[in-house]
Amino acid sequence: MAKNQKKNGKKKVIIQAIILVLLVVGISFSFIPLFKNLKFGLDLQGGFEILYKAESIDGSKMNSEKLTATYKTLSKRIDSLGVSEPEIIIEGNDKIRVKLAGVKNPEEARTQLSTVATLSFRDTEDNLLMTSEVLRAGGAKIGQDSAGNPAVALSIKDKDKFYEVTSKISGQDNNMIVIWLDYNPMTDSYSKEGSLCGTNGSNCLSAATVSQGFASDVIIQGSFTQEEVSNLVDLINSGSLPSKLTEISSNTVGASFGDQTLQTTLVAGIIAIVAIMLILIFIYHFAGFVSSVSMMIYTFLVFGVFWVVGGVLTLPGIAALLLGIGMAVDSNVITFARIREELLKGKSLPTAFREGSKESFSAILDSNVTTLIVAIIMFIFGESSIKGFATMLIITVLVTMVTMVFLTRFLLNIFVKTDYFNDKTNLFIHVKNEDIPDVSKNEETKPNRFHNISFFKHKKIALGISCIIILVGAIVIGIKGLNLGIDYKSGTSVAIITNQNVSVKSIKADIKELGYKASSVEKNDDEINVRIDDTLNGDQVKDLNTYFEEKYEADVNIGVVTNIVQRELIKNAIISVLVALLGIIIYVSIRFKFSYAIGGVVALFHDVMIMFSLFAIFRLEVSSMFIAAVLAIIGYSINDTIVSFDRIRENIKKEDSKKMTLKLFHEICNRSVQETFSRTIYTTVTTILPVIILLILGSRGIFNFNMAMLFGLIAGTYSSIFIATIIFMALEKKNLGKEKEKKIYSDDIEEKKIKGINC
């Protein structure tokens, strides 16, 4: 009977394993069409990005109504450029960002977009009758005709002129006034576009029949919908407003520059994912294989959600995905570590799986929520590429809870229920049968492999290392300052990729010949990066781009940032970091205690200072993407810290608080770090691995970002073990021997029981 059960269990395992393999193969092939349907950003396919400051020439304040009108005007102009899926984003109270991925002629786009909108009134022969000067600024409003239908109400400023023109037109056979926005005499004509008036892509807004002369405000009526009237009002107002668009930053990326970036980053990403899967299988055997299947599904779902929400995939977005994979794997590592612990206590596999899944849930939830808090703050305060990074990070956190927690457990539970692995725990999760004590024979539990390590014995040395790095960094910053990128210094950055053997000296001479001074010129393989302190305008960018393209047959990427953007980015960077830290203090204080929150935040300050210090020492560039890395590390580091804190809290609960001595308290904290140390090593490896691969194989465009991530990940792991716990221990000394504080709710979060997954 038992033999038959074992045989049936083996048969089930084989069938289910084959299904999993087929699932992986199916998902792998599904990636190709899904990936092709994604929208790619400028850095991955080339194109043009520009940030405008909108201003009123008459000195009046820009408001949301005027910005919306300008937004719609830009949309209409972009339609005429033939650019597919443009991005137009209103930022703040007076800025509009335009992204035109894949645009063939950036300079034509720049000229057409920045021209002040021109509204004109013409007859059917295209003769000019009136300009927008006859209207009051913002004089178009949504109104109704006599029958109550939607109509456009025009407020007339020059009533004499308007009466003169309307009287004249009303007496003609073709008694129509045609309203044009940005009329182009070379391409626009009512005889050709009359039937297209009011449609998308046409500069002809409306053609109104005039039956008499008007010396007052008028109504344009017809078979309009409410939406059509609203659009027409916005377009007329944008042409009648005395406003202008000032370019305050721009970025031009060559098409082949973007293609090369996409290819190198994709190769690096695929290698990173495969490497993580192999590590998981090596460490956790069959459970690692199941986790790898979940990781494939996770990656597919992340791309799927990103596609559904209309996200634009950028270089930072891919970096966020790979970081997210490392952090997602952490959810499985925490669970697997717990299952192993339960097995090593002598429990059966089904019991160990159930208990391990239950005990790991609170740590997984807290660590993901803190990362989510940082990602949301990054999205709110970030600009452009940082928003893309934050969007991907938010999606990865949410998908992690669905796939890497519940799906992995569901799949593993299917195999656990076959009973095939009951005596094959080494195959299932890399726990040898001889290491599992027989509790019925009173066999002792095997000690933790790190049980002899006293993590806080040499805490002064650990703190000393941090202090030395931070002190040296502070001295370098005091003497030389930070190597600020154009984001925080303003100016122009130029990246030149060419197959020709061009020296740094030649590029410096070229820049001088063009009339500029290069503050730095660096060469890495076939890419040369130039920094110019001057803020170049559109024509200067065009000339610079043409010069290097023609002389060296180069792909050129030019970014320009003005002082206006610089000040805004610095302000947002400071606010976002402070708000992220405040959000974490509040959450950790609610879920744990204030002493835990302070310990965690001090560790985060430590990580940030280490990152700044190392960037100063190695003279690496500090840009807006560096701040994105800082925020990502804040989310990751507190994630790591919370796993240790969760175990400390759990172990303290097992003791009588009134009998808690300083010695016992230190022993508990040290034991907690010992118990979570293997998980810390594994998750650090799986998170750092993609970063290292991107550093070696990825694009130069995110090299400094990846260096910041590498420094931060190492500092975050180190501070989670030493800094955070040491600070917590120092703060908790005064509470030893006291009764536990009553909380308004339980610290324990009960995971919802779902049949087949965790029960």
Image (tube, rainbow, N blue to C red):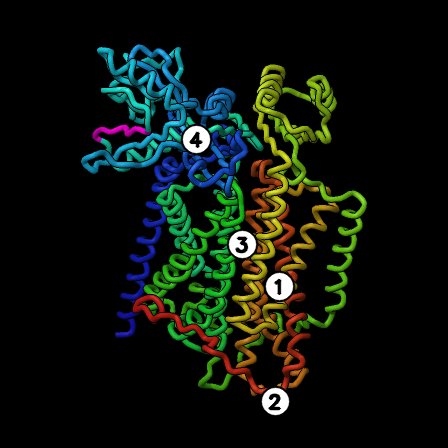
Q: Earlier in the sequence, mark 2 or mark 1?
A: 1
Q: Which residue is mark 4?
A: 137
Classify mark 2: helix, strand or loop: helix
Q: Nearer the viewer, mark 1 or mark 4?
A: 4
Observer-nearest residue: 227 or 166? Answer: 166
Classify mark 1: helix, strand or loop: helix
Q: Which mark is residue 659?
A: 2
Q: Judge whether residue 247 is colored magenta.
A: no
Q: Nearer the viewer, mark 3 or mark 1?
A: 1
How far, Cα to Cα, is label 3 from label 2? 40 Å
Amino acid, disc 2 = Lys
Observer-nearest residue: 425 or 65? Answer: 65
How far, Cα to Cα, is label 2 from label 1? 29 Å
Q: 671 left or right of 60? A: right
Q: Are marks 2 and 1 in contact (CB under 8 Å)?
A: no
Q: Are marks 4 and 3 in contact (CB under 8 Å)?
A: no
From the top left corner, tell me how far across and down residue 186 is, in percent: 39, 11
- What residue range appears in magenta? 217-223
How far, Cα to Cα, is label 1 from label 4? 52 Å
Q: Earlier in the sequence, mark 3 or mark 2?
A: 2
